[in-house]
Image: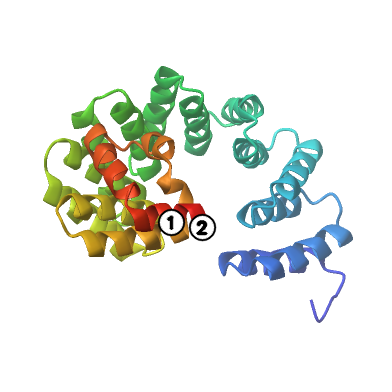
Amino acid sequence: IVINPQDAQGYNNRGNVYYEQKKWDLAVADYNQGIKLQPDNVQAYLARGVVHFQLKDYQGSLADSSQAIKLQPDNANAYLVRGDVYIQLKNYQGALADYSQGIKLQPDNANAYLGQGNVYAQLKNYQAALADYNQVIKLQPDNANAYFGRGVIYQKQGSDRAALADYNQAIAKDGKFIAAIINVGYIKYENGDVDGAIGQWEKAVQINSSVAEAQMALAVALYAKGEQQKALNMAQAALHLDKSFADIEVLKQNLWGTHLIDEARKLLSHPSIQALRTKQ
């Protein structure tokens, strides 16, 4: 870039390095310059779109991925990026259309099937979602996200044994897959293995102490065991991170079982928690 300040690819390459380093603002600045010098560079738009997605600038990501598609209509990755954006914007039909096009262009692209499966899961078309997750696993047997997605559907359908098998597969592929670790705890709790469930949630908190869901589940379990003050402190910390976990409907959506929810009601009715909820 010093030798040739007009070298668009130089800026794009440096942007890619900043991307790998998660220096998002620096990456965007370089992609901006690369696009300014070379306005028809599909990869630059696509890369900038991914960074915008990371920064939760979904409109920016939508604009960039759409521009990439306009410039190169047969670019499967551009459809996948835009599909991911549409999911965040809850435009599920738009997401399905883009993932479908991605699959049409690249029939062996596991990420396209994974995205499509996630949309079908949101739409509660569980058979279609299962078919897509199965295809991902066929193409990428080590894809932890596919096992997790399939496990969630099995759990929703009441197939705890199948759900546990898939969650354990996800954890085997990715030992820090917190969502799978937490969900194993839910199944253990409902089946009477309280200590096993507590162990799962403690592991999740050890991996990432800012995950409110694991802390709240742990607080509820401890409260039910009689460790009230410890449980109340933990519940307050969890609700400071995410107050939505004081909402029973949110707990149900996150696959909390009947027994755990019954215990959660008791904890949430404690005056100190009630006061915290009112204050928030």
- Which residue, as the protein is rendered here, is positioned at the far front? 271
Q: Quick check: 126 above or below 254?
A: above
- The amino acid sitting under disc 2 is Lys
What residue did someone put label 1 on?
Answer: 275
Q: Is residue 132 visible?
A: yes
Task: Give residue 54's quadrant in the image.
Answer: bottom right
| Amino acid beneath label 1 | Ala
Residue drawn at x 33%, y 37% as measured from the top left? 147
- Say above or below: 187 vs 154: below
Label placed on residue 83:
none
For the image, the number of numbered tags is 2
Label 1 crowd bin: few (<14), some (14–19), many (20+), radius 10 Å: few
Image coordinates of residue 66 in percent, x first then y, are: 76, 39
Q: Is residue 132 left or right of residue 5?
A: left
Given residues 11 and 119, the one toward you in this image is: 119
Do we see residue 170 in this rendering?
Answer: no
Give the structural element (helix, strand or loop) at label 1.
Answer: helix
Q: Position of residue 234 (x, y in %)?
A: 32, 62
Separation of marks 1 and 2 at Cα, in angstroms:
6 Å
Q: Is residue 219 left or right of residue 240?
A: left
Question: Where, by quadrant of the figure, is residue 141 drawn?
Answer: top left
Residue 129 horizontal/vertical position (percent): 43, 25
Q: Which residue is mark 2?
A: 279
- Compared to residue 275, the image places residue 148 above or below, namely above
Q: Does the residue at mark 1 contact the one at mark 2 (Cβ under 8 Å)?
A: yes
